[in-house]
Amino acid sequence: MFSNPPACAHPSTHLWQVERDGNPLRRLGHVSPFIGKLGPLDSAALDEIGQLTRAALPDLPQPTLVIGMTESSLLLAFFMALWQQKPVDLRFTTRYERESENKIAFREPHSHGPQHFLALDDARRYSQIVIIEDELTTGATLHNLILAVTGISRRIFVATLRDLRPQNLRDELQNEMQNLGVTLEVLSLETVAWQSKPEIAPLRPLFNPFGRRESNRAAASQALETQWAEFQPGLLVMISECVDIALQFWLQLPANARPELRQITRSPWKVDGEYIRSAQVFPGDDAGSRYFFYNFAPPPNCRALWIGEEFNALIGEQADSFFASQNIESRGILVADG
């Protein structure tokens, strides 16, 4: 049984309950309405989440590593890292075995994509690791990730929008970490009291959370700038995990000039007529991975630009076909792996 959020919970931490499609082990899930999956990305709400996290965290020692979990926590982790007043390293977990000299792997139980990878220099040590989650249901994935990174830091702080774990699972994880000599603190952001916004500005560093080669990252960023200038899309679509380059470009634009920013996701949810009114399904590749575009609405100028990884080129082609069926002109950018 899922509990209701506290009455004091800040609106930016609210989650919508959805029903998973084809996952009998975990029938219900929760998703933030602000991260571009069910509607346009809401940077104001994500800024508030970033500031909530900054206020709730202890003073961050340097160096600190921030980890965002694919897919739903990537944007949450990005905005959390953005609002820190000390430089942090930001890394995203991925379901794709990208090119990287150093990576660790762990498993996400009961998932449509159970294997995760994290591009990380395992020879580097951190004073603290901060893990960002949208929701904690059982904590099984969090447990596996912590075990994978204990050789990098023995101090772990977890910030989640909502902690739904029963008390016995919370106690089990704390006891195991204590026995391993790991200091663990888990905070549910819905319990953090909101205070007036401090007079600070985000650092806006150039994050490279997948550890991309600089030449590939720069080429994709330049392509995005060129397409923006030539095409002026009313909609910018991020395919699956490919959020980093689009988001950094989008945030550099004046707020009144930004197109809607949306995400095509691998998360399979049922149409419920309330939070999910429509679902466009992209069949994906021969491996059987489906992708979804929820609650689509045509952009005002009927021009859409998508950005995705080279290994998701087929999803880009399927997106082009869908946009054409809606009388929308579309273009795409493929980001080289690595």
Image: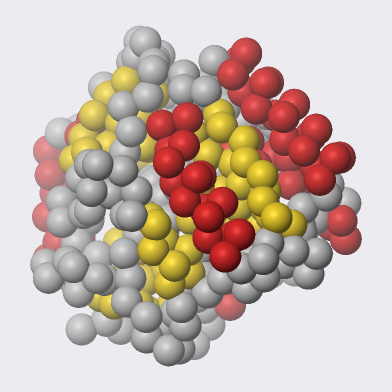
Q: Decide which of 3, 60 is in the foreground and name it.
A: 3
Q: Is residue 181 left or right of residue 129?
A: left
Q: How is the image coloured?
A: secondary structure
Q: Is residue 65 at all visible to an observer of this figure?
A: no
Residue 41, located in which quarter of the rendered image? bottom right
Image: 234 above or below 316: below
Relative placement, left or right, of 162 versus 189 is left
User: Which of the 4 image quarters holds residue 23?
Assistant: bottom left
x then y, percent, for residue 19? 29, 77
Q: Quadrant of residue 261 in the image? A: bottom right
Residue 260 lies, in percent from the top left, at 71, 61
Q: Residue at x 77, y 38 (%)?
A: 227
Total marks in image: 0
Image side of residue 103 versus residue 277, left or right: left
> Residue at position x 38%, y 46% from top?
69
Q: Is residue 138 visible?
A: yes
Dividing the image into 4 quarters, which one contains the N terminus? bottom left
Relative to 291, is 318 on the left or the right? right
Q: Is residue 81 above or below residue 180?
A: below
As displayed, is residue 285 above or below residue 129?
A: below
Measuring from the top left, give residue 145's x and y in whole percent: 26, 39
> Is 332 in front, or is 187?
332
Q: x and y percent of residue 222 in the render?
A: 75, 26
Q: Residue at x 30, y 83 (%)?
A: 3
